[in-house]
Image (spheres, rainbow, N blue to C red):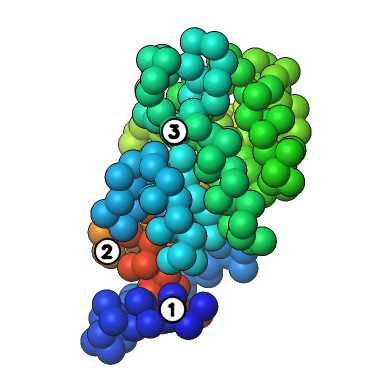
Amino acid sequence: MLRCIFFITRIWGSMGSAMVKEYFKKSGAEIPQEFTVTAHTGALLTKRNSVKSVITSIKACADIIEVDVTFRKDGTVVIIHSDSPADNEGVLFEKIAEKLAKSSTVKANLDLKAYSNTAGVQEILSRHKLLDRAFYTGVFPENVEQVKKGSPLIPYYINGYIDKSNMDNDEYLHSLANEIAQMGAIGLNAHFSCINKKVTNIMHSHSLLVSAWTVNKRKDQCRILSYGVDNITTTSPIKLMAILRSVR
């Protein structure tokens, strides 16, 4: 923890902290008690979907580590941003699970790029006692049944897109929230451009979580935080944690 504080302090000046405090004071924002910071794969200038990326983000004290999960033709679970990797492509998910299991708290955001062997994902997580610390993103409505059948013990967000014309449309948003809830998902995972205060409030009114990706600029992080979202995914987790420290 001391190392995290040291990193954060080095990049955060008193002027920046004061400005953020004033911004949140004026906005009346309330950050959820269980808010989480997710380190996007490749965060902190590391190679995406690498063991180093995972280790670096764990050391930076991110709450959640994101990796892209997919399957080789033989069903082997690997991490790589591809829906059909070659036989020699990708890092074995087994290696990633081993690193995650060494932490007693870090969670895993498994961003699915394919859906054919989620049973294999569940088996690896179970063996490493990580089932209660992992969830899926990258799940669209058409993938839900396959994902639930293959790995019924792993919760999932629904990836969604909300057109700007609908971001303040109560009827549309309640309908969307109902659909997400009926699919058994824990929440909405969307690009931060699709999120505002109304979207967040309506999802919350249906007992759904809201996760925003990928929010890297400080001004955007402050704005999305002010909407009361439950999670922000970012390649700059230390920057986001500094903001949180300044307003909590």
The residue that label 1 is drawn on is 3
Could you tell me which secondary element the residue under label 2 belongs to? Answer: helix
- Marks 1 and 2, the one that precedes in the sequence: 1
Cα separation between marks 3 and 1: 28 Å
First along the sequence among labels 3 and 2: 3
Q: Secondary structure at mark 3?
A: strand
Residue 123 in the image: x percent, y percent? 71, 30
Mark 1–mark 2 Cα distance, whole angstroms, equals 25 Å
Say which amino acid is labelled 1: Arg
Q: Is residue 203 left or right of residue 80?
A: right
Q: Nearer the viewer, mark 1 or mark 2?
A: 1
Amino acid identity at mark 2:
Lys
In front: 31, or 116?
116
- Mark 1 burial class by Cα count in 10 Å: few <14, some 14-19, many 20+: few
**Measured from the top left, where is residue 119 in percent x and y?**
68, 22
Q: Residue at x 63, y 44 (%)?
A: 134
Seen in the picture, residue 142 relative to 123 is either above or below; the reply is: above
Residue 110 position, x and y percent, is 53, 37
- As helix, strand or loop, the secondary structure at mark 1 comes to helix
Amino acid residing under circle 3: Val
- Asked if marks 1 and 2 touch (Cβ < 8 Å), the reply is no
Specify the label residue 219 is tagged with: 2
Give the residue pinned by disc 3: 91
Mark pair 3, 2: CA separation: 34 Å
- Mark sitting earlier along the chain (3/1): 1
- 10 Å crowding of disc 3: few (<14), some (14-19), many (20+): some
